[in-house]
Image (spheres, rainbow, N blue to C red):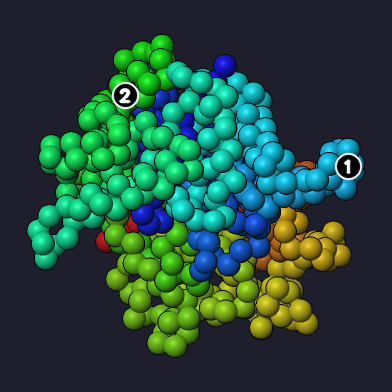
Amino acid sequence: MAKYIFVTGGVVSSLGKGIASASIGKILESKGLKVTLIKCDPYINVDPGTMNPFQHGEVYVTDDGAETDLDLGHYERFTNAKLTKDNNITTGKIYYSVIAKERKGDYLGKTVQIIPHITNEIKNSIKKVALSQKVDVVIVEIGGTVGDIESLPFLEAIRQLKLELGKDYAINIHVTLVPFIKTAGEIKTKPTQHSVGTLREIGIIPDIILCRTEKALSKEARDKIALFCNVDKEAVVSAVDVKSIYEVPFNFKQDGLDKLVERLLNLKCEEGSLACWQEEVLKPIKHPQKEVEIAVVGKYITLQDAYKSIYEALSHGAIANKAKLIIKKVDSEDIEKNGVEKYLSKVKGVLVPGGFGLRGIEGKIAAIRFARENKIPFFGICLGMQVAVVEYARNLCGFKNANSTEFNKSTKYPVISLLEEQKAVQAKGATMRLGAYDCKLKKNTAAHKVYKKEKISERHRHRYEFNNKYKEIMEKKDLVFSGINPQRNLVEVIELKNHPWFIACQFHPEFKSKPDCAHPLFKGFISAALSQK
């Protein structure tokens, strides 16, 4: 039977529960255990697919086409877990399922209540993942902060599960903030005490307290937290701020967190080592041999999490090239206001990521033209590929005012348009082309050289596609269509011949990149940028 680690958070949000969960998963995998991770989100949205990136951050996509929370990206980057739609459980999903059952009469006329019906649905959803994925350990992260009204059903569900599973089969790791007050020159443990007190009122007694802090905890602070929170002294673990999130698994292991989890869950496993992680990931980060500056030209630049996987995949490309990465975040609307040279004249590469809506599009087009004409390595992703097609159509094919029908429904040259089946879609949630699709690469192209194989599979999240009506004329103007979806003849990759590195793809390669195994497109893009004089 699988064993469970329930990860909760207290004091404030954004403490890094997702990174902590992923790091614990990494450590356990190094010991020969098979793990999976689940994110429980207390919001009523069925999934984050229709949520604004400024509010929620990026939408992560799994192979099976689920739109999920961005923490699943951390889980897949740190571990080898293959996540599905079942690995992200939201309040919306739970209520949707319970109400559907009530409408069918599955509850036989009973009054449907939070307890037991909602909590049972949560427990069943968690156990379903453990059974279907046949793992040794399930790490379940509860979103939000202890004390929030909306997370109470999830906390009650894991309280019940912990009780039902019994000793050696379930533990709670509580992540809290231990702030350093600069004016007083000392660490304060009171917020952690209050947070654990709130958790205990709910009926959950933490087994391990993970303390997020600027400075390492002193023995006195650890002892104080252990005494007032009623845990063993060794169960108070310091999670000190780091320069790179990829240091966290190594730090946890050094602090003995793996041995603690091993003992509490009575796990029979190997000693495990993170030596490869240290050599392949941490060493290039701490001792880079060169430096490269990449501009990311987007429309959600003000929010760090909106392009989370993009930034991480770029860092993976830099790690693979033993380079220090400097990301220059450029708002495409600023390019529209102030011109492109001000922002891109000194960078070594330009990446245009995905997005939706008209705002900032002309700035992206200007950035792509600048990169193309000045032989700066360019990488377009999803919308980045679509606007690259628009730029090429306008400036090299003579299609004045060519556009995507997303931005101009009546454009004379709709080089990007909706597929017929998308035109009838009214609902917004989970109706795009989502998940993994095949792509066949043409031999002797830059894309084929990068991937070193002819058939690939990548994850998608978009509605609009290249309009094949314009393919022949654009090929005559030297635009190369190097990747095609063989089932539906859809354009997946474009590139230019006489350019140091100009590749754009309709899919999202960032979702399949890892720090110890950089995605070939990001590795190749950074390599090309480093080659620039």
Left or right: 311 as drawn, with respect to 227? right
Tell me what residue is drawn at x 36 percent, y 44 percent: 196
Left or right: 212 as drawn, with respect to 482? left
Left or right: 507 as drawn, with respect to 74? right
Q: Is 351 situated above or below 217? A: below
Q: Nearer the viewer, residue 349 or 260?
A: 260
Q: Nearer the viewer, residue 69 or 309?
A: 69
- Badge 2: few (under 14), some or many (20 or more) residues near its Cα, within 10 Å? some
Q: Position of residue 204 (x, y in %)?
A: 46, 37
Tell me what residue is drawn at x 23 percent, y 45 percent: 240
Q: In this rendering, does residue 298 appear at all?
A: yes
Q: Position of residue 368 (x, y in %)?
A: 49, 71
Earlier along the polypeptide chain: callout 2 or callout 1?
Answer: 1
Q: Are marks 2 and 1 in contact (CB under 8 Å)?
A: no
- Kindly report which numbered mark, 2 or 1, lies closer to the viewer in this rendering: 1
Which residue in the protein does label 1 denote? 109
Say which amino acid is labelled 1: Gly
Which residue in the protein does label 2 denote? 260
Q: Nearer the viewer, residue 153 or 322?
A: 153
Q: Is 73 situated above or below 495? A: above
Q: Quadrant of the N terminus?
A: top right
Say which amino acid is labelled 2: Leu
Q: What number of labels is visible?
A: 2
Tell me what residue is drawn at x 64 percent, y 23 percent: 131
How far apart are the alpha carbons under marks 2 and 1? 47 Å
Q: In this rendering, does residue 519 appear at all?
A: no
Q: Position of residue 326 (x, y in %)?
A: 29, 60
Tell me what residue is drawn at x 45 percent, y 44 percent: 201
